Image: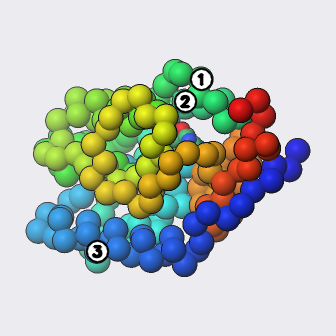
Amino acid sequence: MQAQKRCLISREAIARRVAELGTQIARDYGDREDLVVVGVLKGAFIFMADLVRALPFPVVVDFVRLKSYGAGTTSSGEIKITKDVEEILEDRDVLIVEDIVDLGLTLDFLRRHLLAHQPRSLKICALIDKRERRQVEVPLDYTGFTVAKGFLVGYGLDCGENSRTLPEVFILEPEAVGGK
Ligand code: IMP
Ligand code: MG
């Protein structure tokens, strides 16, 4: 089924914001040498690819894969690590890169998990902070865009693996989101 969707964030707006985030992150980490950027698969892969190239210094990249959503737009309520970090994080500066924060459960879980590795610092960069359904407040150090609500796809975000590779961020029209 092809859901109705409307463009919410254009390529130009994304590119501008990613460049700004890059500048901000570069300023904050400028004197540090081995920043480890941990992307949350799969949703963050496009944002992270752009973000690391907006930084004026090289970083080490690593990834985790967390499963919290089923095939649709509703959380399964359960978070599992299906791929863990491979870098040693102890005494290193770590920046988590996530696509979107909704309930907050995923990032809260990942934050605790990575803190157990005793990094020197741990910050979070999220492309989108979706406010309406937040259950757990997580400290977001860098936020691309804030939206109130809605289910978003594109630029890495998917709905049941659909629409992930679109270059803009779209919002699914409410009538197209089953049962909501
Ligand atoms: P939460 O913050 O624990 O609810 O989980 C956030 C995760 O749910 C994100 O990493 C996404 O994978 C997924 N998610 C939440 N809202 C959306 C959305 O609007 N579009 C696509 N994925 C979403
Ligand atoms: Mg995700």
Q: Earlier in the sequence, mark 1 or mark 3?
A: 3
Q: Residue at x 44, y 55 (%)?
A: 146
Q: Earlier in the sequence, mark 2 or mark 1?
A: 2
**Distance (Cα) linking label 2 and label 1:** 6 Å
In percent of width and height, residue 74 lies at: 64, 30
Q: Earlier in the sequence, mark 3 or mark 2?
A: 3
Residue 23 marker: 3
Say which of 77 and 89 sits in front.
77
- Which residue corresponds to mark 1? 76
- With respect to residue 138, does 80 lie above or below? above
Asked whether residue 18 is in view, the answer is yes
Query: The residue under label 3 is which amino acid type?
Result: Thr
Extreme residue toward the right, this view: 1
Q: Is mark 2 within 8 Å of ligand 1?
A: yes
Describe the element under mark 2 as helix, strand or loop.
strand
Q: Are marks 2 and 1 in contact (CB under 8 Å)?
A: yes
Q: Residue at x 35, y 74 (%)?
A: 20
Q: Please identify the quarter of the rendering in which residue 67 is found.
A: top right
Q: Is residue 73 left or right of residue 28?
A: right
Describe the element under mark 3 as helix, strand or loop.
helix
Badge 3: how crowded within 10 Å, few (<14), some, or many (20+)?
A: some
Say which of 132 and 27 sits in front.
132
